[in-house]
Image: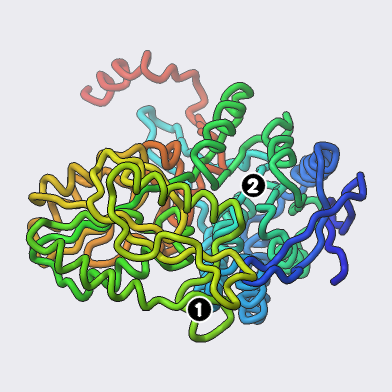
Amino acid sequence: MPNELNYIDGKWTPARSGKTFASHNPANGDLIGVVPLSAREDVGDAVEAAARAFEKWRKYPAPKRAEIIYRAVEILRARKQMLGELLTREMGKVIKEALGDVQEAIDMGMYMAGEGRRLNGLVVPSELPNKWGMAVRDPLGVVGVITPWNFPIAVPSWKIFPALICGNTIVWKPAEDTPVLAIEFVKILQEAGLPPGVMNLVCGYGDAGEALVDHPNVRVITFTGSTATGTKVATKCAQNLKRVSLEMGGKNAIIVLDDADIDLAIEGILWSAFGTSGQRCTACSRVIAHAAIKNNLLDQLAARTAKLKLGDGLAPTTDVGPVINQKAIEKIDAYTQVAKKEGAAIVVGGEPARAGELAKGFFYAPTIFDNVAPTMRVGQEEIFGPALSVLRADSFDHAIAINNQTNYGLSTSVYTLNINRAFEAMRDVTTGLLYVNAGTIGSEVQLPFGGTRGTGNGHREGGGYPVLDTFTEWKTIYVDYSGRLQRAQIDTDELSSRIVQ
């Protein structure tokens, strides 16, 4: 397979050092591609190109920027199957999920391109006569985009499309586990007509991302990844008064109350806990079950989980694909040992899966822990794999309290047929996302995505106008056409007396 290249200033180029690294299929070890191993100087080249392109791009009319994104969407749509298969081979998720990943990028492009003829500001009355006021959005400049491997086209689309439509230029450092798909995405943006320098791509490891965070000409960093790394990114950005948007970890729960539709709840739990092999920031890693139905729920859930078929995500019979790499296997298994030491019981799974063809890849058996107390590490910390803890709640209020008592606050689900309890959950759950009678995963592009506490820093991703605040600066404009000096609050009393007379 030929080597792929970085994309800097409209040209495909190797790393200055000439060094490369390889991307492999986590299901069987097959080589997917060889890409540049970028260093600080490569990142510097990309940032300089983006900074040069910014002055022209910000003046390019937003509806015309939108036309380029619409063209990119049509190319994405035409290549959806090819991109989905590549995504499965490079990242591992089953093909249906991979195609959904691509579809989310299509949807996000369509939604954000619509902002090209909107990009709403504010027009409000002035307190003085013959004076007019408004607030508009200005682009920030160079945006540093750092994205994860688990949604290697959907999550970048949440960041790249809004940043572009607002008039910013971009340097993107994709995850080192999924660089080939990132290159294909940038090829599509190039084909759609983005001018040179507007979109730049540098492949590499953490030192390339660190260089992007450090660069003084990068005005904003948008990061999705672990809370530990995100905290370091936020600290560096704060030292340089650089805007930063963080979307980090989760310890998401599905609350199943005693009046719930149990069959429906089980379907939601299986999808949320073991879809993408549990490698989602919104994955359900806790089930908080009411004591009256816990045992019945657990028995049925364990039986269904034991039947899930592991394998290559391209195989039509596969339910659960591989995890991303050997480090992931080791981390998940370490938490299994922690669970045992803390007194949790392993109901199903609890070990790597290495039988037959599975030995060629990185597979971990879908795992359920029972007898988990809220204070246990497996009840508090993000595992990021197919591992699910079951906790008991004595009441509705107890379930809500358990849900809220973690350092994360991304997604919660409540299964209940009681409308009053549903609305109480809407009021009392303290996560950024709440689902009623649905799992913890699945977002729509017209609504903001993000969490509270250790999950983020208050910004939102995905759709809806709140994401535009990450990539724009507000500029307030006053026009006084009275022909005389008006001193705002100082002259308001005089104005009032003239009106009364």
Estimate how packed mark 1 is, as few (under 14), some (14 to 19) or many (20 or more) residues with alpha carbons within 10 Å.
some
Q: Going 39% across and 32% down the picture, which residue do you hit?
A: 126
Q: Residue furthest top?
A: 490
> Is the image coloured rainbow, by chain, by secondary structure, or in one colour?
rainbow
Q: Is residue 454 left or right of residue 478?
A: left
Q: Are marks 1 and 2 in contact (CB under 8 Å)?
A: no
Label 2 sits on a secondary structure element that is strand
Q: Is residue 487 left or right of residue 419?
A: right
Residue at image mark 2: 145
Estimate how packed mark 2 is, as few (under 14), some (14 to 19) or many (20 or more) residues with alpha carbons within 10 Å.
many
Q: Which quadrant of the structure image shows residue 283?
A: bottom left
- Front residue of 201/500: it is 201
Q: Quadrant of the C terminus?
A: top left
In the displayed structure, 403 sits above or below 237; it is below
Q: Tag 2 or tag 1, which sits nearer the N-term?
A: 1
- Amino acid residing under circle 2: Val
Q: Residue furthest bottom?
A: 316
Estimate the x, y position of residue 24 in percent, counting from the top left. Answer: 71, 65
Q: Is residue 157 visible in this depiction of the protein?
A: no
Residue at image mark 1: 96
In the displayed structure, 34 sits above or below 19; it is below
Label 1 sits on a secondary structure element that is helix
Q: CA distance from mark 1 to mark 2?
A: 27 Å
Q: Which quadrant of the structure image shows residue 78?
A: bottom right
Estimate the x, y position of residue 316 in percent, counting from the top left. Answer: 52, 86
Q: Quadrant of the N terminus?
A: bottom right
In the displayed structure, 461 sits above or below 85; it is above
Q: Going 31% across and 45% down the picture, which residue do you hit?
A: 379
- Amino acid residing under circle 1: Lys
Q: Is residue 261 visible in this depiction of the protein?
A: yes
Estimate the x, y position of residue 234 in percent, counting from the top left. Answer: 55, 31
